[in-house]
Image: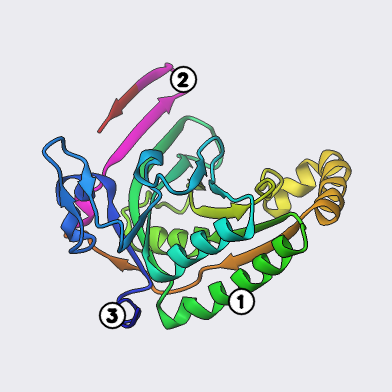
Amino acid sequence: MEALSSEAPLRVVDWAVFTAHPARLHYSFTCSPSGRHVSDPKLIFDLSQSDACLDVTMDESSDDVVLRVSNCEELCHVMWRLQQQLLLTRVTVYHTEIASRHSVETVTIVEDDLAVLVNFSHPSLSLLLTKAAQRAVSCISRDRNFCLEIDLTDALLDWYMTHRDAITSCDDIHNLRTRRTRVCVTNHRAYSHQFDCSPKWIAFLCLCWIFFVPCYVLYRKITCSDIRVKVLCDVASANNSSASCEQKRVTIHTKNTTKYSSV
C-alpha cells in the first residue's frame, strides 16, 4: 500500500505500445508468447478483458465497465481490490471533426485506444474512494440498490486534448466521445448517460429532453442510490512519442462519397 501511494495516480499509454511493450506502463506487466499482456493478479486489477478477472462478475454490454455484486461480501472484495491494487482498463476516444463550419464537406473520425492504469492508493484519490465505499456498504447492508460510479472521463479528455495530435483549426467543429471511461460497481444497473449533453443540444432536443430526463432522474432516485467519484488528477503519459499511437482515421468526403481508412 505504501509503495503504491508513491506512484502516479493515473498513467496512460497507447494500447498498441502497451501490447508491444507492456512494461512501459508498469514494471509488473510482461508479454506472453501469444502476444497478450500478463500481470501479477496480486498487484493488478485487470478490467481490460473479461477473462482476466475471474473472481469478479463484469458486464461489457454497455459503454461502461460494470462490476456486479449481489451481497456485502462481494462488494467488500471488489472495493478491496480497487483500493489495494492498480486498476487497468482499456479506453477508447472517438474524435469527430467537421472540416468546415459553413459546409459539411469532410468528416474525419479518429479512434484512439488507450491503456489506462489508475492508482487509488494515491493520496489524491484514496479518500474519495474510501468515502464512496462506505456509502455503498451502507446501502447494500440495508438491501438498497446502489451504483458506485468512478468517472475518468474529464481527466482523460483534458490530457487527450492537451497532449495528443488532435486536429485543430479555427474553422473546425469537434466532438469527443469516450468508451469505458466509467467503472461502475452495482447490485442494480449503471446510470444511463444517454441524456448527458451540452446546453445547445438540450435546446435543440428541448421537448424530448424535458419529457424524458426528469422522468428518468425521478425514477432513478426512487429505485437506486447513485454514488459518483469524479477523478480529477494529473495524468502521466508513458508514451515515447505521440506518433506511436494506435489510431484509426476515417475520412468521408460528402461530395464524391470517397472513403478511406488507414492505421
In the image, taking residue 102 as reference, residue 217 lies left or right, namely right
Above or below, comparing residue 216 to residue 240 in the picture: above
Q: Amino acid type of disc 2?
A: Lys
Please report the bounds of the magenta region as a residue range: 241-259
Checking the image for residue 3, the label placed there is 3
The secondary element bearing badge 1 is classed as: helix
Measure the C-alpha gap from mark 3 to mark 2.
57 Å
Foreground mark, 1 or 2?
Answer: 1
The secondary element bearing badge 3 is classed as: helix
Above or below, comparing residue 147 to residue 133 in the picture: above
Q: Do the residues labelled 1 and 2 touch (CB within 8 Å)?
A: no
Q: Amino acid type of disc 3?
A: Ala
Q: Give the residue at mark 1.
A: 131
Name the residue: 37% across, 42% down. 49
Residue 83 sits in quarter: bottom left
Percent x, y of residue 35:
16, 38
In the image, taking residue 36 as reference, residue 143 lies left or right, namely right
Q: Give the residue at mark 2.
A: 255
Please tell me which of labels 1 and 3 falls first in the chain: 3
Q: Are marks 1 and 3 in contact (CB under 8 Å)?
A: no
Above or below, comparing residue 160 to residue 20 in the picture: below
The secondary element bearing badge 2 is classed as: loop
Q: Amino acid type of disc 1?
A: Lys
Quadrant of the drawing holding the C terminus: top left
Measure the C-alpha gap from mark 1 to mark 2.
54 Å
Please tell me which of labels 1 and 2 falls first in the chain: 1
Name the residue: 31% across, 53% down. 165
In this view, the residue in front, 92 or 227, is: 227
Percent x, y of residue 255:
46, 20
In this view, the residue in front, 115 or 166, is: 115
Foreground mark, 3 or 2?
Answer: 3
In the image, taking residue 42 as reference, residue 38 lies left or right, namely left
